Image (cartoon, grey):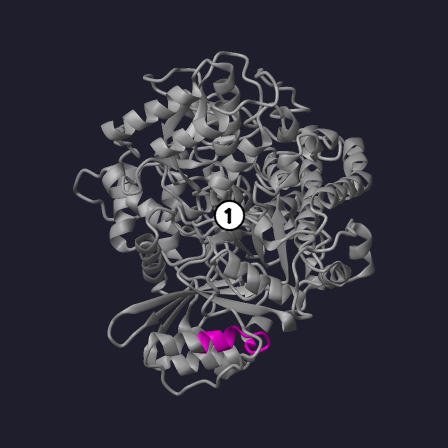
Amino acid sequence: MKLQILIILLFTLLFTACSNKELDEVEFEKVQKNISYEKDIKPILDNRCVSCHSCYNSPCQLKLDSYEGLERGSSKDEVYATRLNAAQPTRLFIDALSTNDWRAKNFSSVLDKDLDSNESIMMQFLFQKELNPQLKGNYSPETDKLTCVKNRDELENYLNENPHKAMPYGFPGLTKEEYNTIMTWLDNGSLNDTKESKIPNFEEKEIKKFEDFLNNPDIKHKVTARYIYEHLFLAHIYFFETSGNFYELIRSTTPSGEKPQIIATRFPYDEVKEPFYYRLQKVNSTIVHKTHMVYKIDDEKLKFYNDIFIKPEWEEEPYLPSYNEQESPNALEVFKQIPALSRYEFMLKDIYFIINTFIKGPVCKGQIALNVIQDHFWVAFMDPKYDLSVIDKNFLKNNFENLKIPNQLGEDPSLFQTFKNLGKEKETKDYQTNRAALYKKHYKDGLKLNYLRNSPNNDSILTVYRHFDSASLHKGALGNIPKTLWVIDFPLLERIYYSLVAGFDVFGNTAHQLLVRTHMDRLRVEGESNFLEFLPQKSRIDYFNSWYIGWLAKYLTVYTPSENETGIKFETKDYKFEFVKNLLAYTNTKKDEINFVEKDYEPIPLKPYYNTKEEIQEALKSLSTPNVSKVIQHFIGAGANTANIRILLNNKENLNYTLVVNRWHKNIALMFDEKSRLDPTKDDIDFIEGFIGSYPNIFVYVNQDDLNDFFDLIQNYENTPIYNKKFLKYTINRANPNFWQAFDYFNKEFQESNPLEYGILDLNKYYEKVILETGF
């Protein structure tokens, strides 16, 4: 009997120790007015929640940029996961259109009230923030292990263990007014009063013109429409810069004049067996910068389509190309009937948009996908008049086998297929050899500077910045002369697009993503090789080897320099520097006033005071010079690549800059252990006026009178109490009670400076450490 009592007591103690404290009943001050989702709630979500909850990197797939996303709820399934088999896509507005369908796909409601407590998960997450507003430790929504609760029991478990991880996650809470407003709305049943968005008459007319062109039954139009659709399916299309309206190009079951009904396919080149129509569908979700890629349609653009696609005689009698899943991703072959010149001119016309789809694309994040590129490089393009892959009608046809892409294996390649298709060293060498022979045959005197595209639209040169696991694209030549440059021709441009955009599946298996990543090694080297062909033949190997340090990098990198001599006459031995200066002059591309360093430039000492913008930018120029600033040697990793800086002048004006860190890599030929190939002592920084990237890592506020002290922090930082106190003084860390005011400021300034390309900035990569006044 005593033994039985002892067992019962032990069991009771064990059960009590393992049970969770029940959640307190939510408290809030009920707002005594009719609350509108559209007018009252959506602005709060946009300003405080969408910054983390949008795109595939939304924690728990909870998207809050539309009511439909809020109603869909959350999922425990990870989008970015290692998997043997491809997952079923869960794209909002595409893969399911009703709440019941999303529940069948394992999405759980955050709005429905628990029967016992009469509270929803969202209400409790907001209330717990009110109870536990303090922040502790580190917060990284993209890498933290999140529970993604689906019921009250799981919520109790999570919040008992993590009381400081309520919502907003890792940032200060809502204001009392915001909190009471949203809690009242949730308590009242989360009603949606959003009115169907009306399309202005002047835009309806433009839409009809475009849809009529795409849906013309003529075979030439049909093939052209497919080609255009496959390149614009991610575009935010606009007709007038000031309207604020954007549209997506879809394939619909309904014709023009009726409500668009999207046909869900995994890839834009998947076959649709039922009759379909190309339609424009209005974007009603909140615009976020990381997925906002704008493309203009107007009468001039439609005329351009007619001039390059419809009027010219094609290579073959027009026919409907195959939708075979092994062939469709290879656009070079599938669309071979369309003149290569037409296809290349189509992409070059809006080259900033096309390259931006590589940079933003369908991924949202992905360090393994992005560690295939340098942190900073420039891209130039072969002029169609001199691109021999366009001019010689047989070159592409003779190299179709060498120009295949791994995406032709689909989203779910087998292990055997994966290993069989890694590398493709023979095809790579054969293509490089064939290309060199073609250029030797036609350009016996070598490549000349004017063979590169010279555009009046400041897009002859584009700048790519990589920010660890995100990247950004910019017109012109930003920064100092980069380590590498790319020259892109038509076949390279088309293959990159179909590898990284049209044919990349974020829901694909790990083998699919591995194949795409390794294929990009080949395409990157091809772009770098094309650039090196403009330099003296004797210099190419040395330049290339300086980019790929280490025996393994050289072993894995297939580079076959040609014997062709350049057609450019060089006057110095610094061939890259001379080439770049001539390229900038030839294309009328401005040098970066702050970051471009002339050979005779000497950094100037810090001044006690800075009275003008010119003096401030001269100081920034000095700090951007290699080996001058120490701060970047101490802050490395995913959350230390960009800083948005606000300089408050004494006359009440503001100057906005972005500090961009360029990490130095021994090589980028390997997928893993990137840290071992970094050398922080060789990193440098660029200061760009305005805004760079979609993911700010830290906000900085500096008063004009403190500039000397702030510049000293950048130049001489050491991990000491004095400098750490300075760091805390100027940076807005995530626990700062004024954090949201800073976020609102930079969003507003970004919107006013670039309203067409503006979208809400993303905070998933904000500097993760909570820094208290007691120190780091």
Q: Outermost residue, left direction? A: 33
Residue 45, compared with residue 198, is above or below; it is below
The residue pinned by badge 1 equals: 158
Residue 544, compared with residue 63, is above or below; it is below
* In this picture, residue 194 sits left or right of residue 656: left
Q: Which residue is drawn at 70% across and 30% down?
A: 394
Q: Which of 157 and 415 is in front in this view?
A: 415
Asked if the stretch drawn in magenta spans residue 620, the answer is yes
Q: Locate the N terminus and report the quarter of the image it occupies.
A: top right
Whole-percent x, y for residue 363 in the image: 55, 42
Residue 44, compared with residue 234, is above or below; it is below
* Residue 192 visible in the shown view: yes
Whole-percent x, y for residue 711 in the image: 45, 79
The segment highlighted magenta reads: 619-630
Asked if the stretch drawn in magenta spans residue 390, the answer is no
* In this picture, residue 196 sits left or right of residue 262: left
Whole-percent x, y for residue 42 in the image: 30, 41
Q: Which residue is drawn at 27% across and 32% down?
A: 194
Q: Outermost residue, front direction? A: 445
Residue 52, compared with residue 119, is above or below; it is below
Q: Which of 125 and 472 is in front in this view?
A: 472
Whole-percent x, y for residue 430 in the image: 80, 40
